[in-house]
Image (spheres, rainbow, N blue to C red):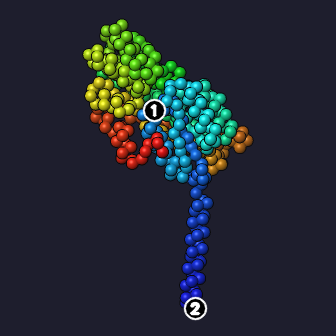
Amino acid sequence: MRKFLKTLAFAATASTCLASTQSLAETANPFKCEPGEEYVMNVMVSGVEYWFPVYEMFKQAGQQFGCKTRYTGTPDYDVNKQIATFDQALAQKPAGILVHPMNSDPFIEPINRAIEQGTAVVTFAADSPNSNRTSFITSDNLAEGTYAADAVAKAMDGKGEYAVLENPGQDNHDKRISAFIARMEAKWPDMKLVGRAASNQDPTKAYQAVLSLAQAHPDLGAVFMPEANSAIGAAQAAKEGGGKIKVMLADVNAKILDMIKAGEIYGSVNPNQGMQGYMGFMLLWMAKHPELIDPMNDTKRSGANGMRVPFVDNGFSIVTAENADDFYWDKYLQRRGTKGIEE
């Protein structure tokens, strides 16, 4: 009986210690969401495939933290409509919003208002630098534009005429275009800029613009644009003109990948969307939980968010016919076995 009681006492003590250890472990792990804690991603032109892998990894990071996530935005290329969806999301009082602001300044007030209401805000891919957003994550748009310029110039033996299609007012696109032109002027003096046209991510406008540019400049040898939708129209126009115009862009989708493999598009620089979404969530979660750190600075005195990280570079890839198969969204989604933006 004494042996039995000793064994029972030992088991009870071990059980208590184990329970205490588990409780301590749970208490000691601050990287965990409270029940119902939700983080939202918000974009414009919400049907654009670029956003889907970003959200996929945003969602995965959220799941690892036990958080809810949601994909929101407007299908339109309209900053006022995007702000309306941002406000709709904000009305649900999420813990944080990862937002791609279509234009910088119009988002200053909505972002600042969200932060004042207790919702953390981080920007991605495009920024609103004059707002109070805590962090900004993107690929290096200047490096992307620079690489694209070098690739085009080398393919043309450093001499010829080129044009650009653009979306004035969108921060990341403006940077890519500016860097592309600046690189040409600095390193490739025999490359001549002969035209600029605003396609605003519209394939039809891009198609018409390239046709007009080619007609006005018969020696046009290349055209660069900072996003994928315009490239579909630009490539079609280039194809109809005999295929002598090299189409270079940033970002990819299934149609672009097919055209790269078919030789109808020269190539693309594509941001690392998965890291953009995953690290975007991490930055956003930390912005919501600044109490986790006690930095040696003046944040307590000033009231500033101690988790402020001004900029994170998520990197980018070079997409060619050789590696295009690695960038198809449907194949990626099948491999991961999820429902993408629908969950």
Write down the quadrant of residue 234 in the picture.
top left
**Residue 294 x, y percent position in the rendering:** 65, 48
Residue 47 — which label? 1
- Relative placement, left or right, of 264 versus 305 is left
Amino acid type at mark 2:
Arg
Write down the quadrant of residue 263 in the picture.
top left
Between 211 and 297, the residue placed more toward the observer is 211
Instruction: Confirm whether residue 36 shows in the render.
Output: yes
Instruction: Confirm whether residue 311 shows in the render.
Output: no
**Residue 37 x, y percent position in the rendering:** 60, 48
Residue 2 — which label? 2
Q: Are marks 2 and 1 in contact (CB under 8 Å)?
A: no
Residue furthest right as drawn? 301
Q: Residues within 10 Å of mark 2 (few under 14, many from 20)?
A: few
The residue located at (29%, 19%) in the rendering is 239
The N terminus: image quadrant: bottom right
The residue located at (32%, 35%) in the rendering is 324
Q: Residues within 10 Å of mark 1 (few under 14, many from 20)?
A: some
Write down the quadrant of residue 196 in the picture.
top left
Amino acid type at mark 1:
Gly
